[in-house]
Amino acid sequence: MSRPNPKISIVIPSFNQAQFLERTLKSLLNQGYDDMELIVCDGLSTDGSIDILEAYKDRIHQLIIEKDKGQSDAINKGFRLATGDLVGWLNSDDTLSPNCLKIIADCFKNAEGNEVIYYSHVLDKIDESDRKIGVIVNEVKSLDDLLNSNYSVSQPGSFYSRKYINEVEGVDVNLNYCMDLDLWLKLLKHGGIYQITHFPLAQFRIWGNSKTTTGGIHFLKEIERVLTLHGMRKFSMNWFRLKIRMTKLYIKNVIA
């Protein structure tokens, strides 16, 4: 017997991405899913983002505009306000696919009940103009697979059991790049994963100022630190992958 439709809470951590923010908001507000809770936490943007948020405030359930300690802090503020069965966050430069929430709700209703993560391993890549420029495929089979074989996760369009988000105390505010990887590793110690294999639920934007583009060696070192903290095996596929990527980046920087 399937469960009833879940209430789904979505947090948008916002800071100085006005050029994309309205597109992010519209992708959520046009979902047509009745039991959605939208929470936006803006860290005192100075680029017009606050004007956009004020224009949509009647459709935002919780709007927090105050100084924060960075993206992870903003996400946790939203998580603490959330009341849904499932929670997730969407960065203010990414978008959800139409019917994403309905698909996630159907997964929740038909799942066995011990799942803590719901996501699609197919993710669209888009550019600054919303043009599709590729597809990312990140299949996470298990905790051990994520820890030792393939550390990539598809954060946009993924949703989590709020019960266990609270139990693991949200994302780590000390992380700047891979708070999503750390969160998945923590959650998968409490339950399973429900994976959609045939449909992209979100669009991940690649542009000049995105963290993925600018993180460089700091991004890779943070990934290594998180995996090591959770028990990555030395000489595993992830261990070798990180060493190779860091070596290539060091050589590139020396040549440049």
Image (cartoon, rainbow, N blue to C red):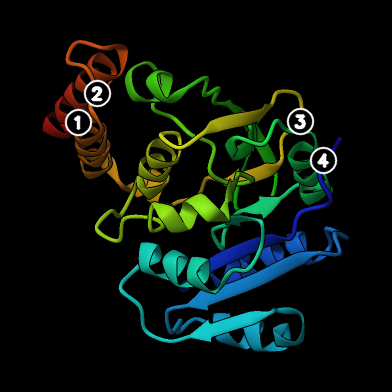
Q: Is residue 20 visible?
A: yes
Q: Amino acid at mark 3?
A: Phe
Q: Name the quarter where the N terminus is drawn.
A: top right
Residue that mark 2 sits on:
232
Bin the neighbour count of mark 3 within 10 Å (Cα to Cα): few under 14, some 14-19, many 20 and up.
some
Query: Residue 245, relative to residue 87: is it above or below?
Result: above
The disc label shown at residue 199, or none:
3
Looking at numbered disc 2 in the image, what kind of residue is underneath it?
A: Met
Rendering coords of residue 79 (x, y %): 51, 65
The circle drawn on residue 106 is 4
Cα distance in 3D space between marks 4 and 2: 34 Å
Mark-to-mark CA distance, 3 and 4: 14 Å
- Residue topped by disc 1: 228
Q: Nearer the viewer, residue 89 or 160?
A: 160
Q: Residue at x 57, y 65 (%)?
A: 11
User: Three-letter amino acid code at disc 4?
Assistant: Asp
Asked whether disc 2 touches disc 1, contact meaning CB atoms under 8 Å apart, the reply is yes
Report whether 239 appears left or right of 88.
left
